Image: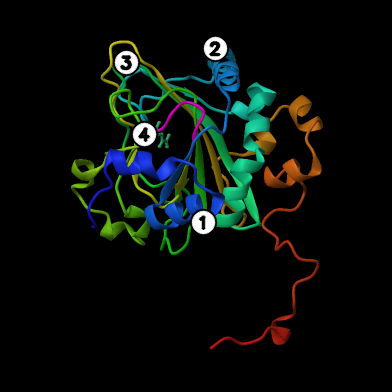
Amino acid sequence: MEKPISTETQRSLVKNRTFDEHFDDLEANGFCVVENVLTANEVSGIREKLLLAATESDRRGVPTHIPSLDPNDANVRVFNLLDLDPVFLELMERPKAIQFVKALVGDNFIVSNFTANIARPGAQSMHAHSDLGIVFPGPWLKPWSMNVLWCLDDVHHDNGATRYLPDSHKITCAKDVPTDMLDNMQSFNAKAGSIIIMDGRLWHTSGENVTENEERAIVFGYYSAAFLRPQVNWNVLLAESTQRNLSPQTRRWLGLNGTANMLSVDFVERPDQLSTQE
Ligand SMILES: O=C(O)CCC(=O)C(=O)O
């Protein structure tokens, strides 16, 4: 493993960068931080809707504490956000996020999940994992998935920032995951309104929130290559009233059409017409 990236270096990575510079960071480090994607007004509006979504999720009988995921209920999980408020559909489709998805994963992608985790004081870490490892057993040869972390609070070590293992996006199989990875993890640092783009291969965990009264709310937009089965079945999760208002493009990204796992070309060449590769 190379020398870890210090918090100061992380901060200097985020200032005044072009898309290409961010993308270079993403490829080199397995993540990049893009500041000021949401205005302060947007952050507070979306945060308010997230809290309402958590209440509505509980009312629908979808619990916001999953004991197998988090050691205690200071972590508030909100699933199926796309069905809970249109603002999350709008976030999922934001060109700024989609630009990274297309550049990293490719044009033929799907939305695999869209959730949130509010780490309240007392929140503890979940099991470390890579998001690609959850949907694909490996080998993890390419960035076939990625997460967009929408920071609705300032995110830092003490309030439970997501912790990542530097350079772990280069790990291709489970046997190469270091057993002492928790000792070498670093915390993301980002201001409210930023997005953190995280390569699906980067090993990470939620941090511990050791503050007295600071919450850490992050919305996670998870995208993957279209050949991977999504984490959730949108056909089941999205109410008819939600589905009715979706554009053809959004329906495609959510896998709501009749076909699934087909090449997005007009025809498939016959095997005898395929060019042989050395
Ligand atoms: O909340 C976090 O910081 C990480 C959450 C996460 O990795 C997950 O839910 O899979």
68 is higher (above) or lower (below) than 4: above
Q: Which residue is disc 4 drawn over?
A: 189
Q: Position of residue 153 (x, y in %)?
A: 45, 22
Measure the alpha-carbon separation of dots 4 and 2. 28 Å
* Beta carbon at label 3 within 8 Å of ligand 1: no
Measure the alpha-carbon separation of dots 3 and 2. 19 Å
Is 251 positioned to the left or the right of 41 in the image?
A: right
Q: Amino acid at mark 1?
A: Trp
Q: Which residue is disc 2 drawn over?
A: 55
What residue is at 27 percent from the left and 59 percent from the top?
Answer: 175
Q: Amino acid at mark 3?
A: Pro
Earlier-in-chain disc, 2 versus 1: 2
Assess whether mark 1 and mark 2 are in contact (beta carbons under 8 angstroms): no
Category of crowding for the residue at label 1, using alpha-carbon neighbours closer than 10 angstroms: few (below 14), some (14–19), many (at least 20): many
Magenta span covers which residues? Answer: 189-195
Assess whether mark 2 and mark 4 are in contact (beta carbons under 8 angstroms): no
* Beta carbon at label 4 within 8 Å of ligand 1: no
Q: Which residue is more in the foreground, 235 or 131?
A: 131
User: Residue 144 shows which numbered tag?
Assistant: 1
What residue is at 48 percent from the left and 19 percent from the top?
Answer: 63
User: Residue 121 shows which numbered tag?
Assistant: 3
* Colouring: rainbow
Q: Which residue is more in the foreground, 147 or 134?
A: 147
